[in-house]
Structures are given as structure tokens and as C-alpha cells.
Image (tube, grey):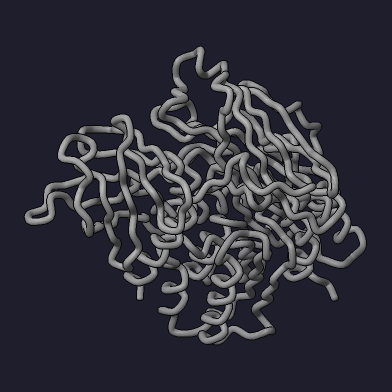
Amino acid sequence: MRHLLIHAQFRILLFSLIFTTGASAQTADTLFFSIDMTGPVSEGWFEPGSEKVGIRGDQPPLSWGTTYQAADPNKDGVYEVAVPFKLNTDSLLVSFKIKVDGVENPDEGWQAGRNHEVMIYKGMQNSVALAWGDRPPEAPVTITGHVEIIRDFESENLLPRDLYIYLPPNYKESDRRYPVLYMHDGQALFDASEIGQEWKVDEAAEELIGSGEIAPVIIVGIGNTQDRIDEYTPSEQIWRHELKRVSPAEVSSLPGVYSGDFKTVEGDTIRFRTKADTLYAMIPGGESWQSLIPKTEHSFYLPQAGITFSFEASEGQGYKLIASKPSIGGKGDVYGEFILNKVKPFVDENFRTKPGKEFTALGGSSLGGLITLYLGLEYPDVFSKLLVVSPSVWWDGRMIINEVDELKGSTDQHIWLDMGTAEGEGAVESAEVLQQILVKKGWSDENLHFIIEEGAAHNERAWAKRVPDMLRFLYSTR
């Protein structure tokens, strides 16, 4: 089953590598981008002939995993792209960044600084113009209540990070002890000035505690680092697939010798052709050829997907094709030990907590939701409640589903599980499979709260709307 899931993921990824440009069908809700890249061109690190530029963002059809490619019709260094949105309300707030798909670029091709934001309106023409060096204005601090920040909290095996510790009302005036909720991506929980968006956990906690709907609680936000993907994933994702040639090459000279068709074990075909000594690829289901960047004489890079195509001599077939990406992830257990052996002891020692498992919860979203479920099930004697928010079930061939399916039975932990319908292809289906496996293992409506949120995207604004119900699920006094 794991083998089939990996190849299914490969097939889905290939089909997803179709990028829409300004020539796309446009609607009244289209957002027109003008992207000035003359600075990077003059600095010499951006090569318009071989590298691509576009937009990534948090509202479909944009995503943070795929670049919506722009074009430079006038060859003046100013790129244009029209992104058609489907608005179900009068307006939509979109977070986005410029992304360059290439090799050896600053910050791996990501525009520096916090995300940009633009409000688009239904039935109107919307546009935004920005240059690579533009930065969004500083956002005001939005902390509500009392949040203590511990800067550069050390770890022996991981990068240092900040801790954000929300203390309930009247903490200073009382001597009582409190349950603790530990959450990942700590800089996104309480203060919009940190990354531009926030979960508004502090606002929700202040209101619900003040009204008596939930018991007072300490909430610890564990900041992420540049190694977030590695730390929030339980396994190393190895991405390598071999394809066989099924049609002859067009010519016998380089790079034309690599032209022709290659098939995956699932029967999907990738086509290659050459034009003006440049190798192009046609992805299954695609309608446009994508240029490849030569890395060596025998290997080429597809920047939009981060895939390297390596052509290796194969007896009787001329060449076989290896499609690969760098392995990533797999430090989840080390990160878990950091929480258990460093963060939790520090919080228990310096704040008035109830350290027992019945008073300790863990939560996070996206990859943070993935690592929450993994670590929670790994340490049921430490965490009795889990907030598994928009989890990245797709990781490593949906390995988390196999992990849950290998459980002997329910751990009797209380689990919140949710997903939005606008979080990407297959996200809801994966969450439903995960829920079904949990039910099969013995969870029920009494300790598993499963929500599919209609129209919710994969961002902090969507999660903020669900935070009050999450806190009620964990700490309701009613």
C-alpha cells in the first residue's frame, strides 16, 4: 500500500505542475499582478532566460507549494500575471509573495520579509504592482492580555527559537495552578506583527476565560525555525522515481538525445523535446512546454517543482530517466524530545502549571498538525488532548495514516481534527480517511471531534475563526 501511495503522490504532483499565465481565462474577480524584477536582473542573480518568476499565496488558485507563473511579454523585466479567483463573498483577503524558481538564488527564491496582503472585491478589476525589493509596512503589535516572550530558547540538537507564553487573567494575583496547551508555530499565535497574520489565540482565550466558558489555561507557543519542515515531520521523505523510454530521441546530439517520451510505472508519460539547444518538458495533462535548466551534461532542473531529471545510459534503451528531489524531513522525534526534555520542564519549573497528562495538551496546524498527531500518539502518557488542525496528511505517502492504522487500539486521548474545503486537492479526502482510521481504532464522538469547514483556506485567518471552538473543546466549563 505504501508503494502505491508514493506513486499516486508522484502522479498527482506531475498533474499539478501546470501553471496558468496571464493568457488564462479572466473573470471579474481576477487579480492582475505586475512584478518588477529589474533589480534582481541588474544585480545579476536572476536570469530571465532560464529562470521563472511568479506568485505564491494562501487563497486558491494560489498556494504556497506551487508558483503561479508570470510572463514578461515586453522583455523589460516587468512580469505580468492574471490570477482568477472565485469569490463566495463580497471581498477576499489574499496573502502572497513573489517566488523565483531557479537555482542558487537568495532565500531559495523567496521574496524576503513578511507576506504581502491585498483585498480583492467581487465584480471589480483588482490589481497590484510591486517590485522584488518591496516590503509590507510594519504591522502593529496585537497582543491581548499578558504574553511573556523568552528569546532564543536553547536546544542541544536543534536551532534556538522563541517561546511565547500566554498567562491567563489574574495569574499574577493568584497562587493557583493551570493546565497547559503547547502549540507549534508560536510566532503565529498571538501577534500579527510577527508574520503579518495570527491565530488570535490570546483574544479568544481572554474572552472565553472572562465569560467563564472555559477554565483558565496557560498557552505556550513554541516558535518555529528555518528547519521547520525537518522538525515538523516524523519521517524523511525520499523522492526518487525511475521512468523508462518509450519513444526514440528526435536527434543524436546533445541535448536532443534526451528528447522523446518516458513513462512512469503508473503509465503516465513525460515528453521531452529540444529547441535552440534548450530541453523542454511536457508534464502529463499539460498544455505547455516548460524549459529545463541544465545542471550537468546529463541532468536538468525543473524549477517550478524542484525536480531534477537525470538521464542515465541504459542498455538497449539508450537512456533511462531518474526524477528526483532532495530528501527532506525526519527530525520529528528530535523535536519531540526537545519539547519533552527542555520546553515542558522549563515551563513547569518557571510557571504555576498542572504538569500531569490530564492537564497537558498539544496543538498545531499544517505540518504542525501532522507532528501534533504523531507526537501525541507517541506520548499518550504526556498529552491527553490534541488539536490536529488542517494536518499535512500527504507527507511521505500519507505515512501518518499507516502510523495510526498500526495502533493496537485507541489511546483514549481527546482529538480535535479539522480541514477546510479550500485547502487544496485531496486535503478533505485525506482528513476523512484519517478520521475513519481513528474511528476504526476505537475513537468515537465522545473523544474525537471532526470538522470539515466549508470554504476555509489553509491560513491563519481560517484557523483563527475556529480557535474559540478549539478552546471550548479542550477546556469548556459547561
Give the answer, above or below, for where 364 lies relative to 148: below
Q: Nearer the viewer, residue 42 or 275?
A: 275
Residue 458's x, y, as percent?
65, 55
Extreme residue toward the right, this view: 211
Farthest top residue in view: 42
| Residue 382 position (above or below residue 126) | below
**Residue 167 can be seen, yes or no:** no
Residue drawn at the location 41% of the way across and 29% of the way down? 50
Q: Residue furthest front?
A: 250
Near-viewer residue (453 or 477): 453
Give percent across and percent down for residue 277: 29, 31
In the image, 440 versus 89, the foreground residue is: 89
Is residue 171 something one can see in this rendering? yes
- x 60%, y 59%: residue: 424
Looking at the image, is 259 positioned above or below residue 133? below
Task: Identify the image quadrant of residue 449.
Answer: bottom right
Which image quarter holds the C terminus? bottom right
Q: Position of residue 184 (x, y in %)?
A: 60, 51
Instruction: Using residue 9 as the reference point, say whether residue 154 is left or right of it.
Output: right
Q: Dividing the picture into quarters, in which one does residue 7 lie? A: bottom left
* Image side of residue 189 versus residue 323, left or right: right
Residue at point 66%, 67% (across, down): 359
Q: Position of residue 300 (x, y in %)?
A: 30, 38
**Would you place residue 378 above or below residue 222 in this image?**
below
Q: What is the number of callouts on the image?
A: 0
